[in-house]
Image (cartoon, grey):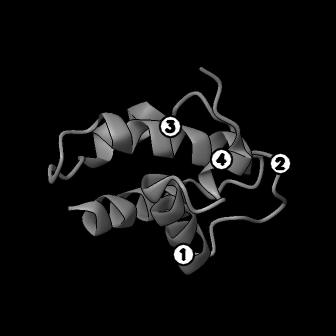
Amino acid sequence: QITTIEATTDGSDKVGAIVHAAWVKHDVAQCGYCQSGQIMSATAFLKALPRGRQPTTVEIDAAMAGNICRCGTYARIRTAVADAARALA
């Protein structure tokens, strides 16, 4: 099965919608170069996390490590992922 970034924004993916809302709330995006990959990774990570369990900073960093942000918004990315996890709890 292939999931695209558009599938996380069309309203059919609850976790994707929550991740997108957190991205906007925390003003994560700057240039946009990495955003599709970041959002897809965050969505997959949160879907794999047991329901209600809050990830640690180390877990978030490990889950997001495959994406390089040339603007350096890693702190905002980490905050947005943690916020989305709280919203899902």
Identify the residue at image location x=48%, y=45%: 43
Task: Determine the CA span between mark 1 and mark 4.
Answer: 21 Å
- Residue 68 vs 27, above or below: the answer is above
- Residue 75 vs 67, above or below: the answer is below
Identify the residue at image location x=49%, y=45%: 42
Do callouts 4 and 2 mark residues in contact (Cβ within 8 Å)? no
Q: Amino acid at mark 2?
A: Tyr
The image quadrant that residue 66 belongs to is top right
Q: Nearer the viewer, residue 37 or 60?
A: 37
Task: Determine the CA span between mark 1 and mark 2.
Answer: 17 Å
Q: Label 3, on which residue?
A: 64
Task: Determine the CA span between mark 4 and mark 2.
Answer: 19 Å
The percent position of residue 46, horizontal first and vertical second, equals 36, 44
Disc 2, SS: loop
Indicate the quadrant containing the N terminus: top left, top right, bottom left or bottom right.
top right
Q: Label 2, on which residue?
A: 33
Disc 3, SS: helix
* Dot 1 crowding, Cα within 10 Å, few <14, some 14–19, many 20+: some
- Residue 78 vs 41, above or below: the answer is below
Q: Is residue 7 left or right of residue 46?
A: right
Q: Earlier in the sequence, mark 3 or mark 4?
A: 4
| Tag nearer the camera, 4 or 2 | 4
Q: Is residue 80 left or right of residue 49?
A: right
Q: Label 4, on which residue?
A: 7
One can see residue 12 in this view? yes
Q: Label 1, on which residue?
A: 26
Q: Amino acid at mark 3?
A: Met
Disc 1, SS: loop
Task: Determine the CA span between mark 3 and mark 4.
Answer: 20 Å
Q: Earlier in the sequence, mark 1 or mark 2?
A: 1
Do callouts 1 and 3 mark residues in contact (Cβ within 8 Å)? no
